[in-house]
Amino acid sequence: MRPALSRLLAPLALALAAALPAPAAAPKPLKVLLVTGGCCHDYVQQKDLLKAGLEQRANVVVEHLHTPDKSTKPPLSSHNNPAYADGYDLVIHDECAAGIDDPAMVRNVLTPHLRGVPAVALHCAMHSYRVSKEFAQPQTPGSPGGLWFDFLGLQSSRHGPQEPIQVKFTDSKHPITRGLTGWTTGKEELYNNVQPPSVYAAHRPLATGVQRTKNKKSGATEDNESVVVWTNEYGPKKARVFCTTLGHNNETVADARYLDLLARGLLWAAGKLDDSGRPAAGFGPGGR
């Protein structure tokens, strides 16, 4: 009886198994292009710190577009190839290309983002691609001189000395910052804000930085404050852009608090962060 019963139940078991929905396939990791190289920073180390830190915190694969050149005009393929980001889900701009002022080159760099590819911009990316010699003066959004600043959503022209910066989150309701607490960095550079952030309609400030310095002429102690973390939307497709001016020294780049912030900013820009600040299903660490 038992063999006969087994023969009768086997087709039923197979039919039930076939009727059950197949388990959902894990999403593919986001493919991220990290652009590094140029003046004034230890990109050889920082590119690897960023790759390891982000891949530990999110379901991403970070690939490098790097040059060891340490000039202000690093020879990056993105300057001459507008298709440099084809196949990538997001681009991280961490280059220092302050000497690149050819509008045609800058448009090549911007082309993927005009087509909707989201971005993260770090530190010296804010001082790159300044096509106007009057970059220390406010550039009108949409003007030829504002080409790169329109993408960033904030204009900066200089930085202070290397001293600690007190990071204060000013928008605790944004998914990127929800639940995060501020901290004081090691030696960092505070970038100035040339004009009020409100000039850029899509700019949303998330954190300010306060740096205490000594006036060289008077010797008096001064506290300088600027926006150091923000978001923007760029171009006709409103590509999301996450920006921070922090990240000069390796100590900051390797800091877990900094990497946590960047991972959230990356996921937000890619549309993979929920309103509570948690990665979308499958895009957390290890694909969780």
Image (tube, rainbow, N blue to C red):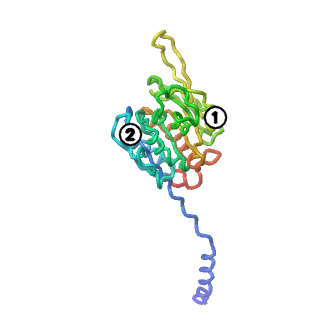
Mark-to-mark CA distance, 1 and 2: 32 Å
Label 1: which secondary element: loop
Where residue 98 sits, quadrant-wise, is top left
Closer to the eye: label 1 or 2? 2
Quarter holding the N terminus is bottom right
For the residues labelled 1 and 2, say whether their Cβ atoms are less than 8 Å apart. Answer: no
Instruction: Establish if 30 lies above or below 70.
Output: below
Quarter holding the C terminus is bottom right
Which residue was labeled with disc 2? 37
Identity of the amino acid at label 1? Asp
Residue 183 or residue 177, whichever sits in front = 177
Q: Which disc, if any, is residue 51?
A: none
Instruction: Establish if 166 lies above or below 33.
Output: above
Which residue was labeled with disc 1? 171
Residue at screen point 58% across, 34% down:
141
* Labels 1 and 2: the sequence-earlier one: 2
Q: In this orientation, does residue 214 appear? A: yes
Where residue 261 sits, quadrant-wise, is top right
Residue 258 or residue 138, whichever sits in front = 138
Residue 60 location in percent, x, y? 49, 51
Label 2: which secondary element: strand
Residue at screen point 56% across, 33% down:
154
Residue 233 location in percent, x, y? 59, 42
Where residue 197 sits, quadrant-wise, is top right
